[in-house]
Amino acid sequence: MRRIASSIAGEIGLRRALGARPVHIAAQFLAESTALGLFGGLIGASLGVVAVLAVTVYHSWTALLDPRVVLAAPAAGAIIGLLAGLYPALRAGTVEPADALRR
């Protein structure tokens, strides 16, 4: 766990030392967390659709899927990822380059 945190701190320090502003670091963190949430929502929605189809085929039922629900899952995942990444993004943006490189 510490090794991952130190490599991330080193990356932040290197980017800051090369001239990245705190807003650039924060934007990177927010983009990454939003993308992770979006992909998690896509995977979850896909697995849900596959499960519904598998059960309906097994029981010889007719599948009824509301497309709004299927499309809402990735959007909800992206929003949750964005909100979850706010605090780490703000913290990462305030790290001084020398301190981050020392870690």
Image: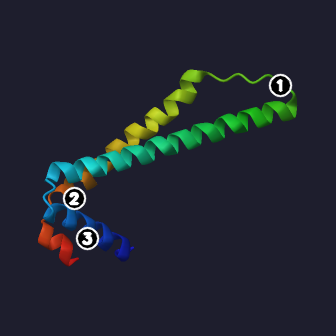
Residue placed most toward the observer, 56 or 15: 15
Q: Which residue is mark 2?
A: 92
Q: Secondary structure at mark 1?
A: loop
Q: Position of residue 40 (x, y in %)?
A: 51, 45
Question: From the viewer's perspective, is 77 left or right of 23?
Answer: right
Question: From the viewer's perspective, is 42 left or right of 14?
Answer: right
Residue placed most toward the observer, 85 or 22: 22
Which is more foreground, mark 2 or mark 1?
2
Q: Residue at x 14, y 65 (%)?
A: 17
- First of labels 2, 1 by sequence position: 1
Question: From the viewer's perspective, is 14 left or right of 82?
Answer: left
Amino acid beneath label 2: Ala
Q: Residue at x 51, y 34 (%)?
A: 73
Residue at mark 3 to residue at mark 2: CA–CA distance: 11 Å
Amino acid beneath label 1: Trp
Quarter holding the C terminus is bottom left
Which is more foreground, mark 3 or mark 1?
3
Amino acid beneath label 3: Gly
Q: Position of residue 23 (x, y in %)?
A: 17, 48
* Residue that protrudes farthest toward the front in the picture: 18
Q: Which mark is residue 61?
A: 1
Residue at mark 2 to residue at mark 1: CA–CA distance: 51 Å
Q: Which residue is mark 3?
A: 10
Residue at mark 3 to residue at mark 1: CA–CA distance: 55 Å
- Count neighbours of disc 2 (C-alpha within 10 A) and say few if under 14, some if 14 to 19, many if 20 or more: many
Quarter holding the N terminus is bottom left
Q: Position of residue 81 (x, y in %)?
A: 39, 45
Q: Secondary structure at mark 3?
A: helix
